[in-house]
Amino acid sequence: MTKKFFAILLVSLLVVNTAYSQKRDMPLSETAWAGLLSCEPSNELYTSFSHSALHICDTAMGIDVVYNYGTFDFNTPHFVWKFATRTLDYCLSRESYRSFIADYTQQRRCVWEQRLNLSRQEVCNLFLMLEFNYQPEYRWYRYDFFRDNCATRIRDMICESLDHREIIYPKDDRTGKSYREIVYTTNENRPWWRFTVDLALGARCDRDRSTWECAFLPLEMKGQFDTLCVSHPATQIAEPAVKLLEDRREPLKRSLTPDVCFWTLFVVVLILTFFEQRKGWQLKIMDMLLFIVPALLSLVALFLWFCSAHWCTKWNFNLLWASPLFFYLAGAAVRRKKDKPLGKAYKTVAFIQIAMLLALIGMMATGWPQHLNRAILPIALTLFARLAATLRMRKRQNT
C-alpha cells in the first residue's frame, strides 16, 4: 500500500511539474500566431531595398506587436562615415501593430503579410527569442547589407524557432542569381541609383548565390516563403501573402538615363576632338575635367576596398576606368603647351591607362569577373578617345 501511494504521489508530482513547465514556457495562448511582414520601397532612397518585420499576435493575451531589426538613427555621430566603413550598429525595435501600420500608411508604402504555419510551441519559441533579443544589452548588432540585416535576422529567428523541424531547401540549390541581380529587382525605374550601386559593389557580388543567401532581400524572402516547405509534416512555411496596404507612392519624375547622358558626352567629345585635330584647338580644360572626375571616384573605390569592412565592395574593377592614374593625366593636361612634346612619363602613364580601358571593354563584353554597368562603356570610350587623340596629335607635332 505504501509503495502504491508513493508511486501515485510521484506520478502526480511529475504531471504537475510538466504542466507548470509547459505553462511557464507557453507565454501565449492557443490562438497566438506569427506573421512575416514585407514592405515595398518608398520614394526615399534609404528604403530602396524594401524591409521585413515580424508580427506576433495573441488577442487573448492582449499582444499585438511588431519586431523590426532594421532600426537605425540618422542622428548618430558621424553617421555617413560609420555606414561607409561598416561600423554603424542597427538594433531590434518593438512597436504596436497599430503604430506600425499607421507609419507605413503615412509613407504610402505597400505592405504584405504572410501568416507563418507554426505550432503553438514554435510561435512561443519565436516570441521568447524576440523578447530576449529586445533586451538593451542584446538588441544592437553590426549591420551587414548582404549577410546580416533586417531580413536575414528574421529568417534565422524563424529557423531557430522550429520545434524538431527544418525548412526544406532545393537539393540543387543554384539559383542562377547574384547579389547584384537581386538588388536590381527593387528599383528598376531608378537608373542613376542602379549606376551608383554598380560603382560601389565589387566582383564578389556577381557569384551565384543559394536560396538561403538570396533571402537577404526582404521581397526575395517573401517570394521564397510562398513556395518553401517545412518538414515533419511537410507543409508550406507560410500561407499566401495578403496585401495590408496599397502602394500609393507618387510616380517618380522621369530623367535622362546615364546611358543617354554618357553617350551624348561621347559624341560631343568626338566632335570637339575632330575640330581639335583640324584646327589645332587646345582642349586642356575639357581634358582636365574629364580626367579629374574618374580620379576622384577612384579615391572612393579605393576607400571602400581597403578602408571599409564591407566585404561586398572589395575587388572592384571599376578602378580600371575610375583610376588614380588620371590625377597625373589631369595635371599634365593643364600644364601641357601646344608646341611642347610629350614627356616619356606622360606617354607611359597614358599607354598604361589605355591598356586598362581596353581590358575594361573586354570585361564588359564577357561579364567576367565583374558585371559592369552598361553606361560605363561610353565613359571608357570617351576617355580612350581623348588619350589616343592627345598621343596622336603630339606624335604628328614631333614629326
Image: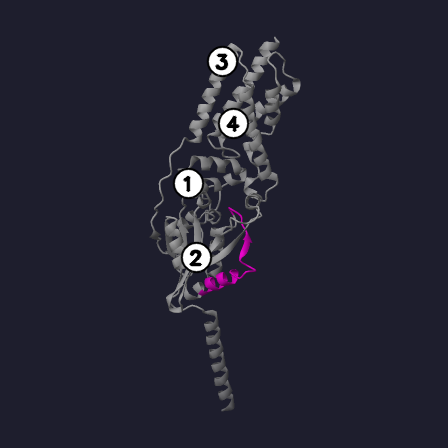
- Indicate which disc, 1 or 3, sits on the residue closer to the N terminus: 1
Q: Residues within 10 Å of mark 3 (few under 14, many from 20)?
A: few
- The disc placed on residue 275 is 3
The question of residue 36 being in magenta is answered with: no
Tag of residue 321 = none
Closest to the observer, 105 or 9: 105
For the residues labelled 1 and 4, the Cα–Cα distance comes to 28 Å
First along the sequence among labels 2 and 3: 2
Is 94 left, or right, of 308 in this rendering?
A: left
Q: Is residue 227 visible?
A: no
The x and y percentages for residue 142 are 56, 51
Work out whether mark 3 precedes mark 4 in sequence or the reverse, and give the earlier one: 3
Q: Which mark is residue 187?
A: 1
What segment carries the magenta color? 124-146
* Eye-nearest disc, 3 or 4: 3
* Spatial separation of the CA atoms under disc 2 and disc 3: 63 Å
- Asked if residue 216 lies left or right of residue 306, the reply is left
Query: Which residue in the structure is indicated by mark 4?
Result: 362
In what element is the residue under mark 1?
loop
Tell me which amino acid carries mark 1: Asn
Q: Residue at x 42, y 40 (%)?
A: 187
What separation in Å lies between label 4 and label 2 (alpha carbons)? 46 Å
Q: Image quadrant for the C terminus?
A: top right
Image position, residue 32 (x, y; %) = 39, 65
